[in-house]
Amino acid sequence: MKALFAALLGTAALVVPATAQTVKIGAVISETGPGASLGIPEANSLRLLPTEVDGHDIQYIILDDGSDATRAVTAMRKLVAEDRVDAVIGSSVTPASLAMVEVAGELQVPTISLAGSAAIVTPVEGAREWMFKTAQNDALMAGAIADHMAANEVETVGIIAFSDSYGDNWISVVTPLLEEKGIEIVASERYARTDTSVTGQMLRVTSSRPDAVFVIGAGTPAVLPQQALVQRNYQGLVYQTHGVANSDFLRVGGAAVNGAIMPVGPVVVAEQLPDDHPSKEAAVAYKESYEAAHGAGSVSAFGSYAHDAGILLQNAIPVAARSAEPGTPEFRAALRDALEGLSDVTYVNGVATMSPTDHIGQDERARVIVTIEDGGWKLLP
């Protein structure tokens, strides 16, 4: 069955008659706005997902939220009320995903976020009982950064973070981890995703003479602080979050981002993974499929989050279909339960085992540490 895609929120969707067994999957993706470098590969990956699972046609409807939380909520309500989707994937960014949590609970539709913040799925109670996630939690990635800093004798760090919920959540999880390692935060600055200069903030950060600087940003807006560090000839270590792991960050950052260290999903260095890594085969296969459609070097971790959301649904849909018909509240509830019951699902970002208290189900196999060398990603031991 032909897949269905609506490109823009508010644009009338092309209607393809659905059969009684069709499962409708809505997606709220940031294809425009500051989160576009995340959302575009995610939407591209959704368009590569299979349109039949276990005898059921799968119909995808993708709406663009413009990286805006209000538009994300509007899109989600439209997908459920008008398109009667069975599940939702999205959004790409943390603020929009957090805004969608209450809607998921209110409308009782299982939703798989592609954003990083653990606050989207924890604690698993109330509306969050309907929320799942594929992007690694910031807490999992923050632990890798704290470990790397400690192993490299970093004693002081300066932080510059987004002035929104992405920055808030990262600071809340990384601060106690750094304290446990005896690493002192000597400066902490904030900036907006749309800012065009961080000169004042970086002057204050570098004036504190930290051993390392941690940039808490995502996508191409995370380039700006690192460019400012180069302009000030900063010689310490520079860390970024997994929110920058795409080719747009490398293209926009150029030589300025060489040497940056960060935790990322395995797909970023798929061919460099050891042969016994559980995700190597899945990561290489996804990379080859994506780059065959979109060109060499185009794959990113963000697209893999959408791909993995599809893998979770492909495992859960057959289970839910045993007890309810797609298109009904009973099927949405059964699909939620099936997602929560998934165990040892190997996908691009590790191995997922969900539970009533864990709606991401990942462990250390979902992360690797890399650096940027000569404009490319290099796996670190």
Image (cartoon, rainbow, N blue to C red):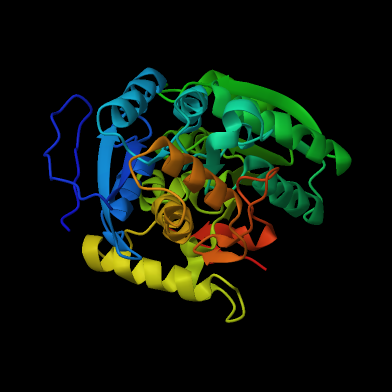
- At 33% from the left and 49% from the top, the residue drawn is 41
Q: From where the camera sits, is residue 169 visible?
A: yes
Identify which residue, 229 or 174, lies in the foreground: 174
- At 32% from the left and 40% from the top, the residue drawn is 26
Q: From where the camera sits, is residue 182 visible?
A: no
Q: Position of residue 332 (x, y in %)?
A: 44, 41
Residue 160, placed above or below residue 55: above
Tell me where residue 161 sits by quadrant. top right
Residue 247, placed above or below residue 280: above
Tell me where residue 117 sits by quadrant. top right
Identify which residue, 164 or 153, lies in the foreground: 164
Residue 121, placed above or below residue 24: above
- At 69% from the left and 59% from the top, the residue drawn is 364
Identify which residue, 121 or 175, lies in the foreground: 121
Residue 103, placed above or below residue 138: above
Q: Position of residue 142 (x, y in %)?
A: 69, 44
Q: Quadrant of the C terminus?
A: bottom right
